[in-house]
Image (cartoon, rainbow, N blue to C red):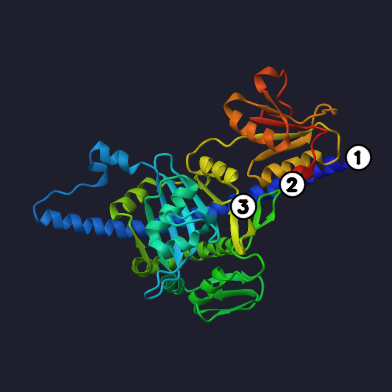
Amino acid sequence: MLTPEELELKRKELEEKRRLKRERRRRRMMIYGIAIILAILLGIGTAYYTYNKAIRLSQGTQGSTPSEQGSPEKAASLRPVNVLVLGIDERPDDPGRTDTMILASINPADKRVALISLPRDTRVRIPGRRGYDRINAAHVYGGPRLAMAAVSEFLGIPVDYYVKINFDGFEKLIDILGGVEIDVERRMKYDDYAGNLHIDLYPGRQVLNGADALAYVRFRSDGLGDISLVDPAKGEYGGRIIRQQKFIDALIRQAARPATISKLPSLAVQLVDCISTNLPVTRILNLALNLRDLDTYSVATAVVPGTGDTVNGIAYWVPNEDATKVMVDRLVWGLEPVTIQVLNGSGAAGAAGRAAARLREQGFPVLDVRDAQRYGYRQTEVIVSPDRWDVGTQIAQMFDAKIIDRSSVESTAWGDRQYDVMVIVGENFSPTQF
């Protein structure tokens, strides 16, 4: 008969398998969406390029395709590019706050794409402004340029391009597709007369037109707001961002239907009307061509890790800086994520699970939780490979633990593999010490 801890471990293993299955499905649907968008952009870019090439030829000048250019230009087209995608409710004489912000980090050489959602209430410093503010205010103060600068400073990466999508155009795109079928989870009623936003949706499966689809993805009066940390142990979030992901899945299924092919010209025209960008058309064309063979496992999605909190009377999404850095290193720079194993060396029931939950809450990826080969560890130990010493130091500080170089330990492969960091929970561990 299994012990309570073994049952808990089995339950966590099953939950992890289910989470991985959901993640694979989400990535697969995301790649379909990217393919559709790139196909439309490719069509626009190709038409534009062909048109201009014909003009150059008629004027006696020879044009060249990106592949015919010299090696410096070709090398430039394969450099990583970070694009800030902004969804905005723009009005006359009012630049508007960004309602949706996604950083798309595209690496054409390695054929990798990372999509990082930034909650609109993320607490950051905006360049040129004093103190902290919500990240969606950057567009009000300085348009897309300042929004790019704010995201660049926050994530510590260069952001050179933006794509701004107007909500009016979004509605028309959905209407051209013939609406999107989705199961609305609950009654959604909200009126903002000052912002001219009115949401009135009933629960149940239905086809949403453009206006209702926009209302669905913008609704945030459910107690979770834009985003909330629902399960710290698993790093699971809830709120509007989760609904947006659900809507994207439904939108992609609708757009992937054969009947959509005949609507591509109208979609392309509408895309031009509702999108503004500083991405050169030739750059769009290069990206589309270089990513045409992108596979499902080359696309990663994430949300800036953090928690909802009130600071000086203002509600923010307060980012976890350490976890955000780990996320950026992995998704943008392509650094291999650290692998962590947590072992119960104290003998206290559930100690390893609670320590693993705390690590996951701080953004560290714990891959294995089990009992140590023996009990009786008085102090928590963190056994680290030399190339992950910086991560091991952070974890050792969290647990008031002794840090040990892996090369000085006889046996570090407890289980079916060796990990970069092995945390052996000792008797000095207390969940209340944080």
What is the secondary structure assignment of the residue under circle 3?
Answer: strand
Most foreground residue, 24 or 276: 276
The residue tagged 1 is 1
The residue tagged 2 is 14
Left or right: residue 131 versus residue 148 is: right
What is the secondary structure assignment of the residue under circle 2?
Answer: helix
The furthest residue to the left: 60
* Callouts 2 and 3 close, C-beta under 8 Å: no
Left or right: residue 78 versus residue 71 is: right
For the point 44% across and 57% down, the residue is 129
Q: Decide if residue 345 is in sight here.
A: yes
The numbered mark, 2 or 1, whose residue comes first in the sequence reads 1
Measure how far apart labels 1 and 3 are at the Cα level.
Answer: 39 Å
The numbered mark, 1 or 3, whose residue comes first in the sequence reads 1
Q: Work out whether 14 lies above or below 428.
A: below
Return the x and y of residue 153 as percentages of the image width and height. 45, 48
